[in-house]
Amino acid sequence: MGKNKTSTRLQRLEELSGLLKSNDHNLVSDLAEKLSVSSRTIMRDLDLLKEKGYPIETSLGRGGGVSLHKHWGLGRLHFNYKEIIDLLLSLAVMEKLHSPIFLSNLKSIRHKIAASFPEKQRKQVQAVRKRILLSEIASQNIPEPSQPPTATTKSSANSVYEAFFEMKILKINYIDVKGSKTQRSIEPHYILLCWPIWYVLAWDHLREDVRCFRLDRIQTAKVENQSFKLKNSQTLIGKLENFTVRL
């Protein structure tokens, strides 16, 4: 089968699964008309979806009704690994906040979600999770962000996030607690949450050493093409306490 035909069929299967999810009951003839193919082609596509694990139910009789099992839903959502990390991190943050309104089984839920993905994707998730550090709630002597995030700071945060995931060098303009501005080239090895403050634990090329940057004080950020390799975790994390007094 040629590349174009393969691409066309994959697109049709995607559209077919969307139609099945959006309607409780479908006629094969209606599906064929909507996708501009024959009923025989729809039947072959349905068989293929069944092989992929879709719980397709068929009803006998004129018209050939088909539908997805009524309980088909959350368990079959497809996430990329960044979305998975967002979900797992959100649950982990809830745990760390010790909020009385959340159930006590968040940790087990988080582990079940992580374990439910294919091995290759699970390894990616676990590798990134190890680089996300959660500390206790920040002490009162650490000032909170003075103003709500702007479009610029949100854009900078997204660039930090991208560089962190893709392990790319990041160029930033940073303003410290004294108001001094510097331009840095950093390797964002770890992200640290000390609620409600986010930090980037990085190797700073300017200082040739480990530095911890508050995310809300990064004025601008640009992801570079150059990649970096993770340094020994103890080299970075072991120095973290040295910087907490001047975050």
Image: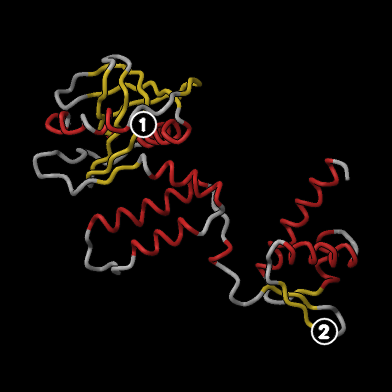
- Secondary element under disc 1, as helix, strand or loop, is strand
Q: Looking at the picture, how far across and down is residue 150, in whole percent? A: 33, 37
Q: What is the count of numbered marks?
A: 2
Q: Which mark is residue 189?
A: 1
Mark 1: give few (<14), some (14-19) or many (20+) Cα within 10 Å.
many
Give me the residue at 83% from left, 78% from top: 64
Give me the residue at 30% from left, 43% from top: 133
- In what quadrant of the picture does the N terminus appear? top right
Front in this rendered view, residue 229 or 82: 229
User: Within the image, what quadrant is residue 178 found in?
Assistant: top left
Dot 1 or dot 2: first in sequence order is 2
- Secondary element under disc 2, as helix, strand or loop, is loop
User: Within the image, what quadrant is residue 43 found in?
Assistant: bottom right
Q: Looking at the picture, how far across and down is residue 130, in whole percent? A: 37, 42
Amino acid type, mark 2? Leu
Using the image, determine if residue 212 lies above or below residue 180.
below
Question: Badge 2 is on which residue?
Answer: 60
- In what quadrant of the picture does the C terminus appear? top left
Outermost residue, left side? 141
Outermost residue, bottom side? 61
Estimate the spatial distance between the alpha carbons at disc 1 and disc 2, rounded to whole Å.
58 Å
Q: Which mark is residue 164?
A: none
Front in this rendered view, residue 159 or 243: 243
Amino acid type, mark 1? His
Asked if residue 54 lies left or right of residue 80, the reply is: right
Q: Looking at the picture, how far across and down is residue 79, in whole percent? A: 54, 52
Give me the residue at 42% from left, 49% from top: 86
Using the image, determine if residue 234 lies above or below residue 129.
above
Asked if residue 74 lies left or right of residue 238, the reply is: right
